[in-house]
């Protein structure tokens, strides 16, 4: 049985620099936006949050559910936690992030299933594509909810 990866190891793996390093944010943005797929975008986005979601939501969900379902659950939980925080700050119920993040999970799964990659493209095109998927998900959520 292997020892679980620590937060510090996870952040260094995702950003290339130690936790708290001055280039951590820059590297996260560069790696996530420049990822060659929307699935990989989420590998690099917000590594501290991803570490806890992976450890406490994705891995346990994946033990009892198919991977695609565990991905949906993980995004929905992340959205629900965002809704909770915004609801506390606004002092009123907010229910937008849960559906939005769930839509993004569906986009992740569709692009992964279809093997949509942009590794051939320059960084700015990959960044535009990844941002477009986020905006598209937001727009679809706004229409549906």
Image (cartoon, rainbow, N blue to C red):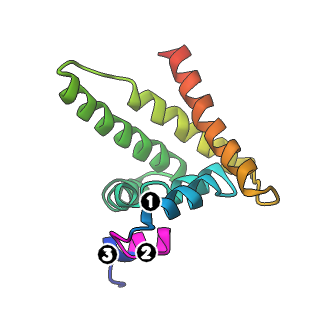
The answer to if 14 sits in the magenta stretch is yes
Whether tag 1 and tag 3 are in contact, CB under 8 A, the answer is no
Which of these two is toward me, 7 or 57?
7
Residue at left offset 24%, top offset 20%: 93
**Residue at numbered disc 1:** 25
Is 114 located above or below residue 84 in the figure?
below
Q: Residue 6 carries which label?
A: 3
Furthest residue toward front: 22
**Residue at numbered disc 2:** 12
Which of these two is toward me, 96 or 65?
96
Q: Position of residue 101 (x, y in %)?
A: 46, 36
The residue tagged with tag 1: helix, strand or loop? helix
* Residue range of the region highlighted in magenta in the rendering: 10-21
Please give left or right for residue 59 compared with residue 43 in the image. Answer: left
Q: In this rendering, which labeled residue sits more in front, label 2 or label 3?
A: 2
Disc with the residue nearer the chain's start (2 vs 3): 3
Does the image show residue 5? no
Which of these two is toward me, 8 or 69?
8
């Amino acid at each position: 049985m292997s020892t679980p990866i620590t937060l510090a190891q996870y952040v260094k793996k995702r950003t290339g620099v130690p936790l708290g390093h001055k280039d951590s944010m820059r590297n996260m943005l560069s790696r996530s936006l420049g990822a060659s797929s929307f699935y990989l975008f989420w590998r690099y986005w917000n590594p501290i949050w991803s570490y806890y979601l992976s450890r406490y939501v994705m891995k346990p969900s994946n033990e009892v559910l198919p991977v695609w379902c565990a991905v949906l659950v993980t995004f929905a939980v992340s959205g629900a936690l965002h809704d909770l925080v915004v609801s506390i700050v606004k002092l009123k119920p907010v229910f937008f992030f849960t559906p939005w993040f769930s839509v993004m999970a569906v986009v992740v799964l569709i692009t992964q299933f279809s093997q949509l990659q942009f590794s051939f493209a320059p960084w700015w095109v990959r960044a535009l594509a990844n941002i477009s998927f986020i905006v598209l998900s937001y727009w679809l959520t706004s229409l549906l909810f």
